[in-house]
Image (cartoon, grey):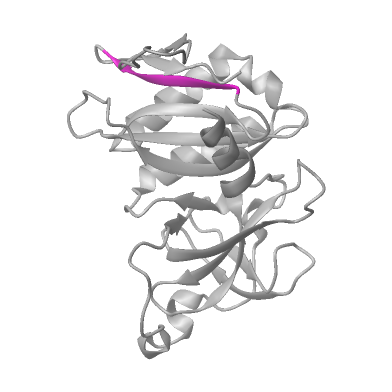
Amino acid sequence: MMIRKLKYGITIFIGLTFGAVAELSWAKNPSSSLPSSHLPSSVAQSAEMGVLTTTQGSQINIRSGPGIEYSALHYGVVGDRVQILDSQRENSSDIYSRRWHQVRFVESGAVGWVRGDFLIQTKDSVSNTCHQSLSQAQNQVNNVRNAFLSGILVETNSLSPVRGKPNELVLVVGGPGEDAILSSGELMQTISERLIQNCGTISSVKIASNNSGWHHVFGLINGRVQIFDCIDAGPGNQQQWGQYFCGL
């Protein structure tokens, strides 16, 4: 569990405030700004991939460095595929500092930095209804005082018995108000139901702290979205569908 804590809290994700929705930009869209010949001759097949996400019709600023103080080189839109090259916090000494990802656009080869809340870390395509549901989840999380959505990740869940839904969607929340989200079963249930309904391959949703191991899991059991049981990760304990190892 400690490895997963480090993965979510340190290695992968960032924080956000969603007030500047998608940072509407005047710059060019890198999906069409460069010819395909600008792609590097060798791109590692094992590199982590991602898909940009925000509200439909919005543009996401792609900056020259990991922070809003850096200039906007160009912009991305919903569904743009990228290769993730690097990840950094805006402020390495602040645990609530946003994390940014340096990305290379698959179609054009353009490179720049995107805020982590506008990136789904996955190699798969994402439907428009799923993007819309993620945008709604962002708004709900950010309406909680001093809390924000800090990252989105799709993982394979080998325990899933749901046909055609082998994946778990991880939402990482941050900020001093993250405890309020992780203490609200009603809010987490609402978010999870919508995402499982509208994101085709998702059978469970994990909502996790950016700064500790605390998390909850909701998933499909007998056709209904229910909260999973937290069990001790002690020696000999085997996790089954409908259970998760406690994070604290």
In the image, is residue 48 above or below residue 246?
Answer: below
| Residue 94 percent location from the top left of the image | 81, 45
Q: How many marks?
A: 0
Span colored in magenta: 214-221
- Is residue 220 one of those drawn in magenta? yes
| Residue 38 percent location from the top left of the image | 42, 88
Q: Residue furthest right?
A: 93
Q: Residue furthest left?
A: 163
Q: Nearer the viewer, residue 228 or 248?
A: 248
Question: In screen coordinates, is 136 left or right of 180?
Answer: left
Q: Nearer the viewer, residue 213 or 112?
A: 213
- Is residue 105 one of those drawn in magenta? no
| Residue 77 percent location from the top left of the image | 49, 63
Q: Residue at x 51, y 79 (%)?
A: 110
Question: In screen coordinates, is 222 left or right of 87?
Answer: left
Q: Residue at x 25, y 15 (%)?
A: 223
Q: Residue at x 43, y 64 (%)?
A: 80
| Residue 90 percent location from the top left of the image | 75, 56
Q: Quadrant of the C terminus?
A: top right
Question: In screen coordinates, is 211 left or right of 239?
Answer: right
Q: Main secondary structure of the magenta part?
A: strand
